[in-house]
Image (cartoon, grey):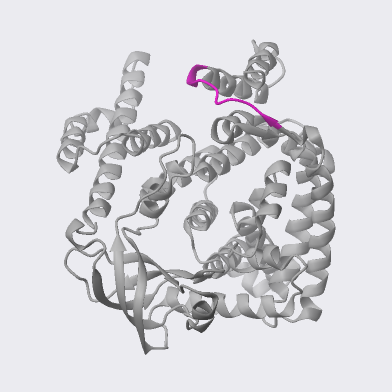
Amino acid sequence: MRIEATAFLLGVCLVQTAATLDGRVAAGGLLLVLAGGLRLAFAGPAAGEGRGRRIARVALAALFAFGVGVAWAAWRAELRLASALDGRLEGIDLDVRGRVASLPQQGERGGRFVFEIEPELAGVPQRVQLSWRGDSPDARAALPQVRAGERWAFTVRLWRPHGSANPAGFDYEAWLLERGVRATGSVRDARLLDDHPGGLMQRVHRLRQEIRARMLAALPEGGQRGLLVALAVGDQQDIDDADWEIFRRTGVGHLVSISGLHVALVAMFCGGLAALAWRRLPTLALRMPAQKAGALAGLGGASAYALLAGMGVPVLRAWLMLLVAAFALLGGRRVAASRVLALALVVVLVVDPWAVLAVGFWLSFAAVAVILAVVGGRVMPRSGWRGALRVQLAISLALVPLLLAQFQSLPLLSPLANLVAIPLVSFVVTPLVLLALPWPSALLLWPANAAAEAMMAMLVWLAMLEFAVLERALPPPWLLACALAAVALLLLPRATPGRLAAPVLLAALLVW
């Protein structure tokens, strides 16, 4: 399973990194060619099967998985690219009707939101991103507040997505493509048709918007209300650029956006409480083990939290990983954690083939793999604060090549900052914020805001140090591959041959 999952990942990466898309015909042809090896690839091992035949069977299975990855990613890309804006409709006034399908983002110049057009119009994609701005401060103040789920009739001007093509910069077009947005535009005229949301996600976005408004009204402007809102509903627009720079220099940006850490935390909290109560009721415990009941409760709590966060792409990836782990536990069979991780990788790529374009995808799976390598397979594993320190240092070391390759910078104080920030955010700030969600008042949110203020004071002090961040040029592919091999060697047991040479390869990466 692990080899096939890796091959499937390579097939998806081949399509997503290609300059052009050859189309479904080429992908389907490759799949048909590889289908001839199905019988040999997935046939059970015969009695007395030689080593060469086993290697050939595994190689054919990996080749088939690679072909499936290529075909699946190419087919999904063809479907999404087919929903493009007709070039003849660019820059002209169009009358459209539909619903606001996202949490509206409000700024100084106006608002921005995703709009789902209904019914479908020829040459116009169904999902577009619209901006509604005023030419002057008075005009912007007079604009109506758009709410999620509302049905509007707009006169808009649309354009195909365009972004900067700077090397190593943010790929705006790929970001929109991954989210199914195939056109951007501006609102010229508007008329409200219906105030009530239609589907489930529109109701969820409406609830998120109401919670955000109530939290912003209850918290002072000078506090950490942007951070608290981000942890509650996944909206980061109220975090200013200065705070983002602090998070970057200290390496704690993953704590601000709702990710696998927060989803897993909610699952552990809900599952632990359910399992504890389940054991106190013998009638229920005889019908279902407390461990499985806890897994179902944890999955339910994490699903609710993921919905409240808007079920965005990063949250969806984390929820799918948790879903696979929960079903593996409910299956009643002992499955290696690495196999569960491999299955989660395949499920994430099947749902979202564009995930390989996001650095969060690589960092999250790499972090989980490092945790399994450090914690699993130990005769006497360390526990308590020593075990947590070992895991944190291992993750910080393992992510060095990926961080330098993606951001050309390395937060040197990240292990220290995370040792303080992770427990504080995970066990103090986030639980207090979630407990205040039914009634977001200043009294209930004050403890979370105070804890966040204390954390930010520590992060500001660390970020001001001159040696907080190490900046280096983009390493060449061969040096990056050597550094990844060095990290893998360092995670192996102490007696592994060549392990002492690994620090030399990492040093070469750091001085490049």
Q: Is residue 46 visible?
A: no
Which quadrant is home to the C terminus?
top right
Expressed as whole percent of the image width and height from the top left, the position of residue 10 reads 38, 32
Instruction: Between residue 488 and residue 380, name the one nearer to us.
Output: 488
Instruction: Between residue 433 and residue 493, name the one nearer to us.
Output: 433
Which quadrant is home to the N terminus?
top left
Task: Please report the bounds of the magenta region as a residue range.
Answer: 470-478
Quadrant in the rendering for residue 432: bottom right
Expressed as whole percent of the image width and height from the top left, the position of residue 175 reads 42, 51
At x 65%, y 68%, the residue is 229
* Image height of 461 relative to 497, above or below: below
- Total marks placed: 0
* Image height of 24 relative to 456, above or below: above
Q: Is residue 363 magenta?
A: no
Quadrant in the rendering for residue 511: top right
Expressed as whole percent of the image width and height from the top left, the position of residue 220 reads 76, 74
Q: Is residue 329 visible?
A: yes
Tell me: 175 left or right of 319: left
Instruction: Between residue 185 and residue 254, name the one nearer to us.
Output: 185
* Image height of 291 relative to 361, above or below: below
Quadrant in the rendering for residue 397: top right
